[in-house]
Image: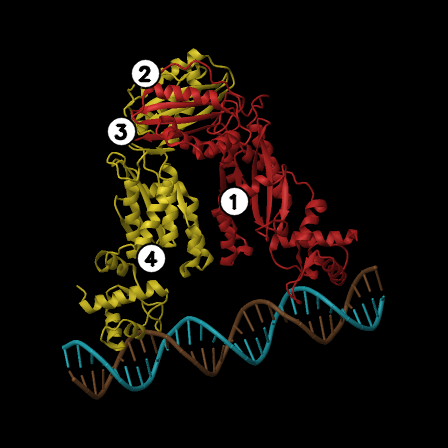
Chain colours: A yellow, B red, C brown, D cyan
Amino acid sequence: MDLTERQLQILEAIINDYVENAEPVGSRSIAKKYNLGVSPATIRNEMSDLEEMGYLTHPHTSAGRVPSDKAYRLYVNTLMKKKNLSAREKKLISDRLAESRNEFDATIRHAAQLLSEITQLASFAMTPATNEETISFIRLLPVDERTLILMIVGDTGNVTNTTLRLTVPYTQEALDLLSKNMTVTYKGRTLDDVLKSEIIREAGSDIEAMSSLQGTVMPSFIRTLEEMLNVNLYMEGMTNIFNLPEFASIDRARAFLEIFTRKDEFARKMLERADGVVVTIGDENDSMKDCTLITATYHVDGRLVGKIGVIGPTRMRYDEVTAIIEYLTSNLSECFRITNGSGACVQLCEGTSDGPHGGDEDESEGDEE
Amino acid sequence: MDLTERQLQILEAIINDYVENAEPVGSRSIAKKYNLGVSPATIRNEMSDLEEMGYLTHPHTSAGRVPSDKAYRLYVNTLMKKKNLSAREKKLISDRLAESRNEFDATIRHAAQLLSEITQLASFAMTPATNEETISFIRLLPVDERTLILMIVGDTGNVTNTTLRLTVPYTQEALDLLSKNMTVTYKGRTLDDVLKSEIIREAGSDIEAMSSLQGTVMPSFIRTLEEMLNVNLYMEGMTNIFNLPEFASIDRARAFLEIFTRKDEFARKMLERADGVVVTIGDENDSMKDCTLITATYHVDGRLVGKIGVIGPTRMRYDEVTAIIEYLTSNLSECFRITNGSGACVQLCEGTSDGPHGGDEDESEGDEE
DNA sequence: ATTAGCACTCCTGTCGAGTGAGTGCTAACA
DNA sequence: TGTTAGCACTCACTCGACAGGAGTGCTAAT
């Protein structure tokens, strides 16, 4: 059954009022503040109907009405008007992102910080998943007679390295050979693929092989691959939620903060979410059933996809938050696009652990000394 | 004025009782639980004296006594008996640290996790400060025609790298030359030293130089050096404090958690603390005036010094926590010592961001393709 | 010096009345 | 038939009174 125009108006008024004041809203205050041309009694009747339809709830008989998850869903889907950010806000976002534009991870982290500062909610940002990244080359660099660096470079310029300290000295020849062999073996294969095959191979490997240089390097190689597959997750503004009345009880606050302590689990869940702006309200979330989660995706070089999002109570300024997150992700994507010079990335683009472009590793390598 | 033996006994009893129950302790309960052979009335008199001397406080007339910071200080300095960990706890620590012993940063993080799990308080662990680390060599590695990797290797095997994406292609020759020049220029100098001189040089650099490959690489070089100087700080168990009655109020909890959000500031403060086990109680801390901070240092290869610590209310099991932190740091130091084979590091020692020895970069390299 | 006894303080929890915000129903009205 | 005014009713919240209890501090006896 569809809602009448007036019911929609009343519902919207209730949502706006409740979002602002966090207190059950009564018929009289709606009639006074938003002049809909009807009396409190009429509004009461409509409210009663809206409650019957599941859009409103009632903490107790003599209290005002509170919007339900269903009401917020309706609001987000149909009622909400697209909001435009003020020039000031836009400038703030652009400027702050530009500050660290040359450093990939720092930019991502700053985006999360910005998001929590502007929305006054908790936020997160993740570096792109690297499942489809392929190995470009592998290097073993000598540090001293027993220390060496294992370096894996992906086709997007993503680098991960590990310092290995052997208990017995290695020879330069063995190092060079292994370095070469590993690159030949793994080049062009995805991290995932290599990891799976290597874990199986390791499990069945013989002791003989383990005593060789390769035998000692391989476990580290596997671990380094695993590390390279992990996304970096930055979470910000967790103490913001203490300002909100819905988290005034220590138990609610605690439950909320525990999300932040289990980053791996959280990252996994976020990776599963669809691309684009996704809003999940209250019960629509698996856990955090009284929170709203708004996530969005940014693109690196049009290929890799990273996620960023806001976590707060279901009572939030949906219009503002989605507007901010949309502007922020488009700005981020712009930042990480180098092919069509956007002006945001004029001279140099650089990333500590990631970057754009499907790289080509076949250019001559040259030795450094 | 010195305390009598009986006063010390009573004070200790009050501290033990309060640490356990978090409630003001009365004369009667002391007389009953700890049979000191005197009546509640006598204990009351002693308590009154102890209060006068500043060891006890009194929330209100008809409440029991609460130990003051001064009492805890006395307890830690003279009353406290050294506690021995149970075999089970020792095994737990050793086993958990051994799990990740080959990965430096992971081990540090696990140490913090362990500390918070066992003490049920908040904890932190930091990687060693690298102020005195010298540059071993610098590498510029090609990824594709416009992407390259800048890699700085310290004398301890500490590696930091950054992926640079240029807007104009570079030549292999320029890359090799710059790589070589940079190594020759900076090798053997400390990170601090190079950073300072380079920042000054950059400020006065001419535009001409900026357009060269060197000009584009240098700002990233500086940033990467800065990154290399930063210690990694891991904080764990922050939600543990919600279990403690002293943090039942949302404001107290909030103030506490805000420490965790300003990691840089926190890291700086912790670096300033003396080596060894350091206990600062309540007012002895600059901020966090109603917390106790217990920190200790571990050693890497007998040279570098890292910090680890516990943060909790002044009411804590000082004996247990110091015992745990002592055992943990000695175990950590053992883990990171390779020269005298401790058995903890038999086959291979490896670290993502650290390692021993003053390296030599001049060994021949060999190419990968 | 120690202790029993006792008055006193002050926190805590409970109970009931009063208050106010808000609803739900009914009857009058346009 | 939809809208509105009026009114009774509900229920949370606040405040003061009161009792109970834990604990102190003082005094006098041992």
Q: Are marks 1 and 3 on the same chain?
A: no
Q: Which residue is tagged 1?
A: B265
State if disc 2 and disc 4 touch (CB < 8 Å).
no
State if disc 3 and disc 4 touch (CB < 8 Å).
no
Return the chain for callout 3.
A
Q: Residue drawn at (77%, 56%), measured in percent from left and top?
A: B37
Say whether disc 4 or disc 3 marks the residue closer to the N-terminus.
Answer: 4
Question: x, y (%) of residue A104?
Answer: 36, 37
Q: CA distance from mark 3 to mark 2?
A: 19 Å
Q: Which residue is tagged 4?
A: A314
Return the chain for callout 2.
B
Residue nearest the observer in this picture, B334 or B228: B228
Q: CA distance from mark 1 to mark 3?
A: 39 Å
Q: Which residue is tagged 3?
A: A358
Q: CA distance from mark 1 to mark 4?
A: 33 Å
Q: CA distance from mark 4 to mark 3?
A: 40 Å
Residue nearest the observer in this picture, B275 or B292: B275
Q: Are marks 1 and 4 on the same chain?
A: no
Mark 4: which secondary structure?
Answer: loop
Q: Are marks 4 and 3 on the same chain?
A: yes
Question: Mark 1 belongs to which amino acid?
Answer: Glu
Residue nearest the observer in this picture, B132 or A50: B132
Say whether disc 2 or disc 1 marks the residue closer to the N-terminus.
Answer: 1
Residue B353 vertical placement versus D12 (above, below): above
